[in-house]
Image (tube, rainbow, N blue to C red):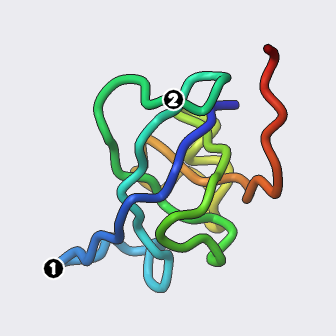
């Protein structure tokens, strides 16, 4: 699983069948200390509860497509859960 922060929302002009009602968020990937790592990306929100500013964990690839119902919709990344707290090593 990967750690990220929701930095915005994405509103698509066309929605693929099976992704109706699934929020899309702009995510900044983070390292294990909570620092930005790499370029922001778009992730489908399988929890349907994440919002801007929230810390989330997400998956990429095949696992991302399995997190949504129906399975195997065309997504590269999917939010799996919301993180309440992050305790990073010193």
Q: Secondary structure at mark 1?
A: loop
In percent of width and height, residue 11 lies at 26, 77
User: Which residue lies under the disc numbered 2?
Assistant: 35
- Say which quarter of the image contains residue 50: bottom right
Q: Are marks 1 and 2 in contact (CB under 8 Å)?
A: no
Query: Left or right: where does residue 27 sit relative to residue 63?
Result: left
Q: Secondary structure at mark 2?
A: loop
Query: Left or right: where does residue 47 sit relative to residue 86?
Result: left
User: Which residue lies under the disc numbered 1?
Assistant: 13
Residue at the image point whose x is 78% and y is 26% from the top: 88
What is the crowding at mark 2: few (fewer than 14 residues within 10 Å), some, or many (at least 20)? few
* The one of 40 and 71 positioned closer to us in this rendering: 40
- Does residue 3 lie above or below 90 as drawn? below
Query: In the picture, which quadrant includes the N terminus?
Result: top right
Query: In the picture, which quadrant includes the C terminus?
Result: top right
In percent of width and height, residue 65 lies at 56, 47
Query: Left or right: where does residue 89 sit relative to residue 28?
Result: right
Residue at the image point whose x is 64% and y is 37% from the top: 63
Query: Left or right: where does residue 44 sit relative to residue 40?
Result: right
């Amino acid at each position: 699983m990967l750690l990220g922060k929701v930095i915005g929302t994405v509103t698509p002009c066309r929605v693929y069948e099976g992704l109706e009602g699934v929020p899309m968020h702009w995510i900044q990937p983070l390292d294990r200390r909570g620092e930005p790592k790499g370029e922001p990306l778009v992730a489908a929100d399988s929890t349907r509860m994440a919002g801007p500013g929230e810390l989330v964990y997400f998956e990429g690839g095949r696992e991302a497509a399995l997190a949504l119902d129906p399975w195997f919709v065309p997504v590269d990344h999917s939010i799996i859960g919301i993180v309440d707290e992050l305790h990073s090593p010193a």
